[in-house]
Amino acid sequence: GAVVSQHPSWVICKSGTSVKIECRSLDFQATTMFWYRQFPKQSLMLMATSNEGSKATYEQGVEKDKFLINHASLTLSTLTVTSAHPEDSSFYICSARDIQVTEAFFGQGTRLTVV
Amino acid sequence: KQEVTQIPAALSVPEGENLVLNCSFTDSAIYNLQWFRQDPGKGLTSLLLIQSSQREQTSGRLNASLDKSSGRSTLYIAASQPGDSATYLCAVFLSTLTFGKGTMLLVSP
């Protein structure tokens, strides 16, 4: 299947700083990328849908000013957690979908710990 | 609003057993259904994708069925192995993917 690369796989940051997470589709063009958050022993919760060249669509309850999403190219989307706080500590996973394919491919996830 | 339920939440079996994981969804208007595997602290690995027009898909020891009208899917794992231990997630897709909470599977040697 197609490969989605997410970086970094884990990051520890101080409260108040910003963290950027990258999601790349390596062998296909992803017109749409999705960002999910997963709490321990919980399912994936969709945060936002990112479309190349346009603004992201955020799910209800997700602060768009806190979670900045940029989808500047057909192979790269970034999620920036701004002014991170300990409650933002979580597992973040991106997913990419090729318009030619209906299957969703996922990155390996990023474990964010805010101290 | 689409809701996806997976039963059981956890399952522990000895190696070699055949097992069935269940997934149900409330809105049958879906494009496809996907089964994923998630290892602890890792991302998702796609196992099987069933289009809404299909009834089942097979890959190796895995077989997934879809009954769209009743809102159900099953994942059948034959001759389970310790390496199959993971959390299995079911997700349905229309405009976005909606996930169940998963079934945590432990296969003991």
Image (cartoon, helix red, strand yellow):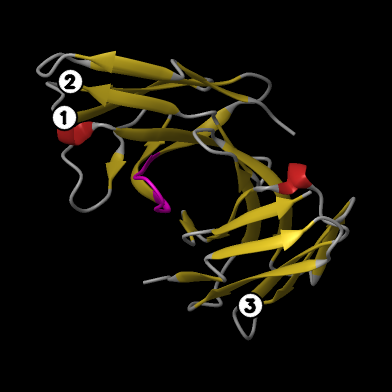
Q: Which residue is mark 1?
A: A86
Mark before the other along the chain sequence, 1 or 2: 1
Task: Tell me if B87 is positioned left or right of A48 in this view.
Answer: right
Q: Which residue is mark 2?
A: A115
Amino acid type of disc 1? Answer: Pro
Single out the residue that lies furthest toward the bottom: B70
Please report, as a chain letter, where disc 2 is located.
A
Amino acid type of disc 3? Answer: Arg
Residue A21 visible in rendering: yes
Amino acid type of disc 2? Answer: Val
Which mark is nearer the camera, 3 or 2? Answer: 2
| As drawn, A28 above or below B94 | above
Task: Tell me if A102 is positioned left or right of B97 in this view.
Answer: right
Q: Position of residue A58 (x, y in %)?
A: 27, 44
Magenta-drawn stretch contains B107: no
Which quarter of the picture shows residue B15? bottom right
SS under mark 1: helix
Tag 1–tag 2 contact (CB < 8 Å): yes
For the residue carrying disc 3, how many other residues have a C-alpha within 10 Å: few (<14), some (14-19), or many (20+)? some
Question: What is the C-alpha distance between the residues marked 3 and 2?
Answer: 42 Å
Q: Nearer the viewer, residue A45 or B69?
A: A45
Q: Which residues are magenta?
A: A36-44
Which quarter of the picture shows residue B2? bottom left
**What residue is drawn where x is 54% and y is 29%?**
A107
| As drawn, B28 above or below A114 | below
| As drawn, A75 above or below A63 | above
